[in-house]
Amino acid sequence: MKGVPFSVFKKAHVEKLKTDLSLKDQAIEAATQFVKEIEKGNLDFQYQLSNQDDNLASSLVSMRDQMKNFAAEERQRNWATEGLAKFVEILRSKGNSFTELSDNIINHLVKYMGANQGALYLVNDDDPQDTFLEMVSCFAYERKKHLHKRIEIGSGIVGQVILEKTTTYMTAIPKDYIKITSGLGASLPRNLLIVPLKLNDVVFGVVELAAFETIKPYQIEFVEKLGESIASTISAVKIAERTQLLLEETQQKTEDMKSQEEEMRQSMEELSATQEEMQRVLTEVQSKEGYLNELINATDDLIYTVDKAYKLVSWNKAFAKTLEQFGLVLEKGSNTLEWYGSDDEKKKQMDLYDRALQGETFELTTQADNKGTLVYFLNIYAPLRNINKEIFSVAVFGKNITEMTIARQQSDKLMKDAQNQTEELKAQEEELRQNMEELSATQEEMNRILQEVQDQERYMKDMINSTKDSILTVDREYKIVNFNKALVASYSGLGITVEKGLDMRKIFSAEEWPKFQQHYDRAFSGEAFEITEHYHSHGFDAYYAINYSPLRNDKGEIIAAAVFAKDTTQLMKASKAATELQLYYNDVIEGMVDCVLTIDADYKIVVANSAFKKVFSGYGLSVEPGSDLLAMAKGDPKKEAEFKKPYVRAFAGEHVEEPHRHHFDLDFQVSYNPLKNNAGEVVGVSLIARDITQRLQLQKQTEELLLESQQQSEELKAQEEELRQNMEELSATQEEMTRQMTEINRVKSQLEVRESIFGYTTILSEADLHGTITLVNDKLCEVSKYSREELIGKPHNVFRHPDMPQELFKIFWQTIKKGEVFKGIIKNKAKDGSHYWVDASIVPVKDETGKIVKYVGARYHIADDEIALMMYNKQAKKLKLPTLKVDSLELA
């Protein structure tokens, strides 16, 4: 009986084990089936959970759920990646117009997002004083809506997004904001997404999407990333349009200059008819000093002379006028070195004077900053000798070549573009060569291709030999690689035989070679430039405009330098002769005591000398070149007809001479003479008026003395009284002029101080109201190590260094937006990651209405880091900002 309980207990235990084992088998079978379904990719398969606690089942279900989440996230990433790639192709294609590109963007975006309606708004800043949002494209239910909608910045939801520069997603849309329409009617959307098109913190527009379905976060992130690409494309298009506009303006200025040159040439031809009379008048000039003064004042070029002590001796009006723009008042005997701010600038200028005082005549190009605008001058320094051939002074001649320099810079840019195109052609030629190697199976085809190459080589030789300009290429060992016939002819005249492999050092003397070696080395360093050379030796006197350009192989390595030399001797001599002749004629006309005037067939004034202007200024009318002479009739038809009578006779070829009574009681003997061109046609009329007032008055007085001497005596007394009154009035006028000149000198002195202070500035930039850089000078590019092309169009914070606290720039923007000048010490970041310190002055520029239109930055480069840190920390403590430390030691 004792064994019964033991055997019953064991059987129950075995039954329980069997049950547990069966449940385990079922769980394993269910888990196995679940895993197989997961392997097939069926992540929605339902796991058959038992009522018991099954950790394996819970783990597998958790794993399935995580895999579903990973799969969903992967689909979202793939969706966004594919979408961005698709829109990159759309943005690259651009189409035939920007409107077509806008339509493609909004059309594909609405479809890809599964939205119902969309619109694209862009910032229209064509007029800086009227910036607004403009709807450029709209799409809904497969139909484009041709709408033109204007939204002010900050107005409505879209305008507020522009100001805040952040994405707006709304699920509660105002009732009357937007409706989605179809053939079944109109309905209010439940979801609205507005994303700014932002690049480098600059907003170019917004994208607006409306949908019935909820817009997921990953979809919003996708639209934000796409917005950066759209903004980048818009920025590139705007920069391209601005560049094209500047190019057209430059071309127009070039055409205007050509037209002015042609008008000057015609004027010179018209004046040639009166050359004999001018020569007679010239012999009557008694004062050589007056003649020379009038001569140098007749030109627009800048002329001044200094003695051996660098003190100012004489100058012309053009030079005085130009220096007045820089705030300088000229005084004879003043030290010219004081015009320059730093000691280095004074030393450089002193060296230039010394070169001329030692007998050297040379020229160089300089640039000056005139109120934020770069002005370029071609300066010629020449020694002046006395009758004993001793140098006693230096003459400096300056010519404003700003427009020509800008045009040449544009030309250099075009040349670089042409070089890029040449490199692309080289790449195409390399591809063609590879194709030729693959087709080398047929000898006949190879021969044909070889013949084509030879023909092309002959074509290139014939092409470079067809020009009269000299062309050669030189390798890095300064040996000739190629040349044309013009070069051979040029050097043969000097007794030099040009051949391939000739060392250029054998052509030039030991004294000449370093200069030319420097030119070649500049080209080998990758620089393309143009210089003008004057060759004057062994009876050979010529000017050449020489272009040096680097030549690269298919790897982009510079292997040679190309030299293009154009003979500009005749042009230079003709230009010099024309300038001298123009100065001569202007001086002759200005030196005449008689009034001289010339007009064209339309009665427009061509030339009027000072005597004519002085006499006729009483009419209150302009007598400058181009003004209408008939305006003196003041619109009265009868007066105009009477006024034109002698001119009409002169235009008919008649020489007319008659007296004329001026309304100031002045009498003139006026001569009207026809001016003819080379074909004998009358193209203008010259007027020469001689004052005969005194002669007629003497005649009248003589007659009156014979008739009534007493009356003459009383009249003389009256004239004396009138003269006394005139003298009193003249004395009062002189006192008033003295007072005005004192005030003018005081203002000029203030301007001189301001310009002197501004002269220490070495780094300049200009930015629009959004902080986008629009202009930089060469010094800024040199210090920041960016090129001009890399800076234009970029935000000004490209220079921001991470050491500078954000609070400093908040103070900076608050100051300049109030219209005040911001001054401070700032640490900037260069392109290569290095830093540099500047003493900055940011000036808001206002228009005539007082509205800020742009900002100009003037900075002085502080080369010493310790001094800069001391200045900055002093500023930081004043503004309650964090200070900077060096080697863990704070600089006080």
Image: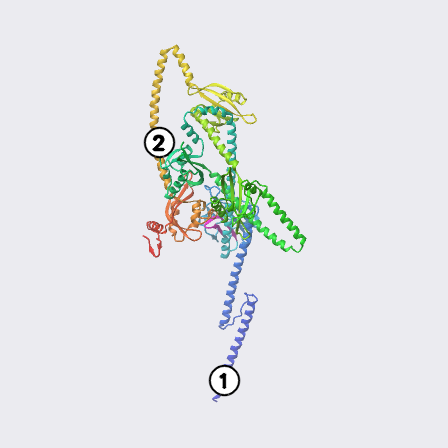
Percent across and percent down for residue 307 are 38, 35
Considering every residue shown, the one lying at the far top of the view is 707
Q: In terms of depth relative to the viewer, which is nearer, 756 or 11?
A: 756
Which class describes the residues within 10 Å of circle 1: few (<14), some (14-19), or many (20+)?
Answer: few
User: Is residue 444 within the magenta segment?
Assistant: no
Q: Which mark is on residue 18?
A: none
Secondary element at image label 2: helix
User: In the drawing, does residue 369 fall left or right of residue 870?
Assistant: right
Percent across and percent down for residue 343 are 36, 43
Percent across and percent down for residue 329 are 37, 35
Percent across and percent down for residue 206 are 49, 49
Q: Nearer the viewer, mark 1 or mark 2?
A: 2
Considering every residue shown, the one lying at the far left of the view is 892
Marks 1 and 2, how far apart in space?
135 Å
Secondary element at image label 1: helix
User: Is residue 196 within the magenta segment?
Assistant: yes
Q: Which residue is mark 1?
A: 8
Q: Which residues are magenta?
A: 193-211
Write down the quadrant of residue 303 in the picture.
Answer: top left
| Residue type at numbered disc 2 | Met
Majority secondary structure in the magenta region: strand
Residue at (51, 81) in percent of width and height? 14
Q: Which residue is mark 2?
A: 741
Q: In terms of depth relative to the viewer, which is nearer, 301 or 180?
A: 301
Q: How many marks?
A: 2
User: In the drawing, does residue 309 fall left or right of residue 683?
Assistant: left
437 relative to 124, above or below: below
